[in-house]
Image (cartoon, grey):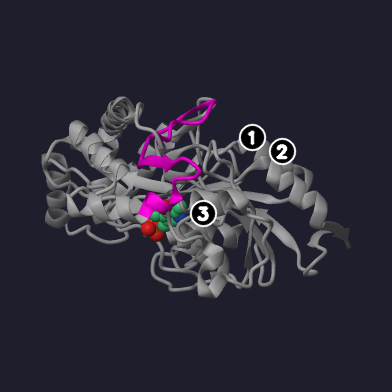
Amino acid sequence: MTKLSFQICNGIKSVIGESKFSLHEPRFNKEELNNLKDCIDTTFVSSIGEYVDKFENLISEYTNSKRVIAVVNGTSALHLALKVAGIKANDEVICPSLTFVATANAISYLDAKPHFVDINEKTLGLDPKALNKWLDEIVVREDGQIKNKNTGRKISAIVPMHAYGHPVEIESIKEIANRYDLFVIEDAAEALGSFYKNKHTGTFGDIGILSFNGNKIITTGGGGALLTDNDEIAEKAKHLSTTAKIKHKWEFVHDQIGFNYRLPNLNASLGCAQMRKLPKFINSKRVLFSKYYEAFKCIKGIKLFSEPINSKSNYWLQTLILERGYEEELPEILDMTNKCGLMTRPAWELIHNLPMYRDCPRAPLPIAESLAKRIINIPSSAFLI
Ligand SMILES: *Cc1c(COP(=O)(O)O)cnc(C)c1O
């Protein structure tokens, strides 16, 4: 065992104890059980039922997003958001390479191409400076369109992602997007409960999305949502999520190729109970951060990632960053911590290194390349403290 991996094992144990904990686990109590029982007793388990509306209203109140459309998962929320934003086949959509694969997959579902731009070391998300510089370099305006002069394709949107719950510099990114007439769709899948300048993540862009997968800060089993202040976009998204069926007492008429993406009542009932716990979860995670911070602050070679300026983070996943020069320690640290029963994970493989995305356009990605070798997520569940 190297000194650093030993220190990290001890640091984690000093905060959460000797038990085995995974990276992130949900917590339920009687309220979830009662809500589920209610769905079963009333037989409203599927796409119709009062919990869906209730859940949407709770999210709307909490995020201050005018409209919320609950769907089956975060990936479908992204797909639908890009679709209603009008992203077309062969468009290019700017996104980070350090993200969960769903960000790029959703772009590809529309036969559009992800176009990777570098991230910022302080936020772990898209870097406005790198974005600005890159767009200045490659954009040409042709027939009223913003085009990538290297590929000839239209660039139509930017999808920033708030990594591990930490807000990106979304205002600067929006300014750049405005200058180039690009849609902004915020992948806030990990960022429910995170605020930038006191405004909820996912409410800055034209559309934002959330995920309520089992490993996220609250869960509905599977689930996701679109956030928007634009009524027209909201109506379109809701219509498309419900097979584009025209409301009628008995007729089955659909006016486009829609999707079966609506969140079932059963899942929404879990979400209603979970939303009441969200403030407590966030509080615990912020306390967990400060305890880990104390445990790691004197260890040479690592730093616990802390929320960027102007933001209040949900600290969804706690993140250790190896200092430059310590990259080689990563495999040993992952091996030792996991052998000790402490679940740790590296960052996602960068998307542009995955076989299906290798040929996508990209800016230089030095920060993403470097951070991908230096990120370690450590046990982060809200109930750990
Ligand atoms: C979880 C996640 C998604 C997808 O959400 P699902 O509900 O799992 O489909 C998308 N983007 C990011 C960054 C995520 O972490």
- Which residue has dot 3 on it? 98
Where residue 100 appears, x then y in whole percent? 45, 57
Q: Is residue 224 visible?
A: no
Q: Nearer the viewer, residue 109 or 258?
A: 109
Residue 171 sits in which quadrant?
A: top right
- Which residue has dot 2 on it? 175
Marks 1 and 3, how far apart at CA: 20 Å
Kindly identify the amino acid type of the residue bearing the numbered disc 2: Glu
Within 10 angstroms of label 2, few (less than 14), some, or many (20 or more) residues?
some
* Image quarter hosting the C terminus: top left
Q: Residue at x 23, y 42 (%)?
A: 9
Where residue 46 appears, x then y in whole percent? 27, 61
Q: Nearer the viewer, mark 3 or mark 2?
A: 3
Q: Nearer the viewer, residue 64 or 10?
A: 10
In the image, residue 243 lies in the stretch drawn in magenta = no
Kindly identify the amino acid type of the residue bearing the numbered disc 1: Glu
